[in-house]
Amino acid sequence: MPSSTPTRSIAPLFALGALRFALHIPAMVAAHAGHETVFTVLGDAARRRGARSLAGQFILSSAAAVAILLAAPQWWSLAFLAGWSAAWSAWGLLVHFIEAREAHARPLHALLLTIAAVGTVLALAGVIGVGLAVYSGNARGVKDACGKGSTNERCQAWANPTKTSGPIK
C-alpha cells in the first residue's frame, strides 16, 4: 500500500500557494507585462469612463436585468447579459473610488475580485443561454426556417397535415 506521507507534505504547500494567490489580488487584475487579456482591456475601458457614466450604466443595466427577469423569465440569458453590464460598471465605480481615495484595503480588493467573478459568470451564462435558445428553437435561428429538413413543429404541421378518417359534415 502506498504511503500517504508525500501527499501530506504537499498539501500545506498547496494551501499556502492558494492563500498567496488569493491574497495577491492586484496581480489578478493586471496582466503580465506586455500581455493583454479580456480583463485588462475591460479594466482600462472602465478606468477611462467617468463615474457619472458608469453610475448611469449601472442603474440602467440593473433595471433592465430585473425588468427582463420579472416580465419574461424565459429570456434569463438576456437578463444575465444586462447583469454583466451592471457588474462591469459596478467594478469601474469601485475602481474609481479606490483610486480617488488611495484606499488599498484588502476587503475592497476582495470585493473587486468578487464583482469581476460574478460578472464573468453572468457573461458566460448569458452567452451560453443565448446560444442554447437559438439552437433549441426558442429564438429566431436556423431551426425556425421552414423548408426541407426543418425540425420546427409549425413547419412539420403544414408539411404533414393530420388526415381525418372520413368526410366532415
Image (tube, rainbow, N blue to C red):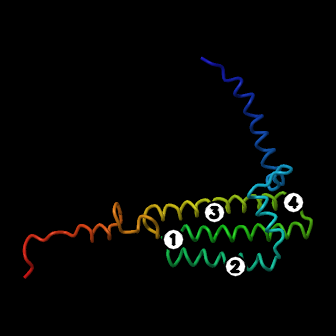
Displayed quadrant of residue 11: top right
Residue behind mark 3: 123
The disc label shown at residue 67, or none: none
Disc 3 marks a residue whose amino acid type is: Ala
Q: Secondary structure at mark 2?
A: helix
N-term-proximal mark, 2 vs 1: 2
Residue behind mark 1: 75
| Tag 3 and tag 2, C-beta contact below 8 Å | no
Q: Front-most of 98 and 78?
A: 78
Tell me the distance, in whole angstroms, between the alpha carbons under discs 2 and 1: 20 Å
**Where is residue 125 drawn, in percent x and y?**
58, 60
Q: Is 117 positioned to the left or the right of 106 in the image?
A: left
Residue behind mark 4: 105
Disc 4 marks a residue whose amino acid type is: Ala
Tell me the distance, in whole angstroms, between the alpha carbons under discs 2 and 4: 26 Å
Tell me the distance, in whole angstroms, between the alpha carbons under discs 3 and 4: 27 Å
Q: Secondary structure at mark 1?
A: helix
| Tag 4 and tag 1, C-beta contact below 8 Å | no
Disc 2 marks a residue whose amino acid type is: Ile
Please state, as top left, top right, bottom left or bottom right, where the C terminus lies in the image. Answer: bottom left
Q: Is residue 74 above or below residue 38?
A: below
Tell me the distance, in whole angstroms, between the alpha carbons under discs 3 and 2: 18 Å
Residue behind mark 2: 59
Q: Residue at x 78, y 40 (%)?
A: 17
Tell me the distance, in whole angstroms, between the alpha carbons under discs 3 and 1: 14 Å
Crowding around mark 3 (Cα neighbors within 10 Å: few <14, some 14 to 19, many 20+) is many
Crowding around mark 4 (Cα neighbors within 10 Å: few <14, some 14 to 19, many 20+) is few
Mark nearer the viewer, 3 or 2: 3
| Tag 3 and tag 4, C-beta contact below 8 Å | no
Disc 1 marks a residue whose amino acid type is: Trp
Q: Front-most of 30 and 150?
A: 150
Crowding around mark 2 (Cα neighbors within 10 Å: few <14, some 14 to 19, many 20+) is some
